[in-house]
Amino acid sequence: MSKKTSYFLTGGIILLLVISYFIIPDFQDFINKTWNVLWSEDKEKIRSYFKDFGFWGPLAIIVVMVVQIFLVIFPSWLPMIVAVLAYGFWGGAAISIAGVYCASTIAFYLGKFLGEDHLEQLLGESKNKKVKYWVSNYGFWTITIFRVSPFLSNDAISIIAGMLSMKYRKFILATLAGIIPLAFAIAYFGEDTDTLKNGLYWIGGAGILIYGIYVYIDHRKNKDPQKS
């Protein structure tokens, strides 16, 4: 499939969803209700809404997390909070990990499908080489930090990893290394949204700082032998 074809296909799907929203009342009502529930601070409303799905409730949250790949304005941590509010500590953590696993895998293979040529056309040859060097040398910990820091673009790093043909096993292990502690942190603080948001900032900031120190030390260590 050519670049233009993939763009037309993606645009067609988005256009179809937009048209469906305006011409199918039931679909519009479902989207509006789900959106309002997700953004409300009414914990009982969120809990009961997804509980009403019964057996399909966890699957509905996982689907939301997968769809979130294409919704830039939709924060990745919000469905995780919903999972905790609806299904408690252990259930919420398990659903969050499963959702991120599915969404990350889809984003990774989407990037693999698009290929490195698309990334080079987007970034240019020089920047593409820098990104490729970074992923090949620091890819595992880069993805881990992006997962621990929910305010970074998790989906973008997954797509880029696929574009640059990173091994899937390495990618998914890095994803799990970051998302498992984050999922349990969200499950622990999920009932207190304000505390959770502050905690996410601290976790993300600390992770980025540690990562920066690691990259700096590793870069210096690899650079010194070349000088001698």
Image (cartoon, rainbow, N blue to C red):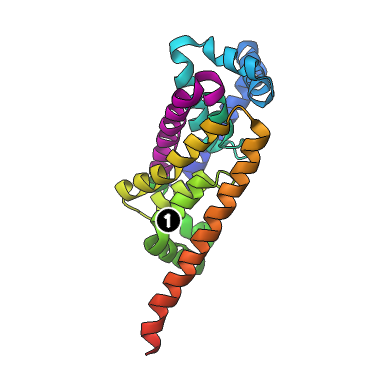
Q: Quadrant of the C terminus?
A: bottom left
Residue pictured at 63% horizontal, 15% vertical: 44
- Tell whether position 222 is magenta: no
* Percent of width and height locating residue 154: 51, 45
Q: Residue at x 43, y 39 (%)?
A: 180
Image quarter of residue 49: top right
The residue segment tinted magenta is: 84-110
Query: Closest to the observer: 97 or 129?
Result: 97
Q: Tag 1: residue type?
A: Trp
Residue 3: percent from the left, percent from the top? 46, 48
Residue 197 horizontal side relative to residue 5, left or right: right
Q: Is residue 89 above or below residue 214?
A: above
**Horizontal arrangement in the rendering, residue 46 relative to residue 174 (left or right):** right
**Mainly helix, strand or loop, the magenta region?**
helix
Q: Which residue is mark 1?
A: 141
Q: Residue at (38%, 42%) from the top-left corner? A: 109
Q: Is residue 22 above or below residue 183?
A: above
Q: Secondary structure at mark 1?
A: helix
Q: Is residue 124 visible?
A: no
In this rendered view, identify the residue nearer to me: 117 or 55. 55
Residue 62 x, y percent position in the rendering = 47, 26
Residue 218 seen: yes
Give the image location of residue 187, x and y in percent: 52, 31
Binning the other alpha carbons within 10 Å of mark 1 as few (below 14), some (14 to 19) or many (20 upward) gives: some
Q: Nearer the viewer, residue 213 or 154?
A: 213
Which quadrant would the N terminus be assigned to in this image?
Answer: top left
Q: Extreme bottom residue here?
A: 228
| Magenta segment includes 98 | yes
Left or right: 167 in relation to 39: left
Q: 90 above or below 155?
A: above
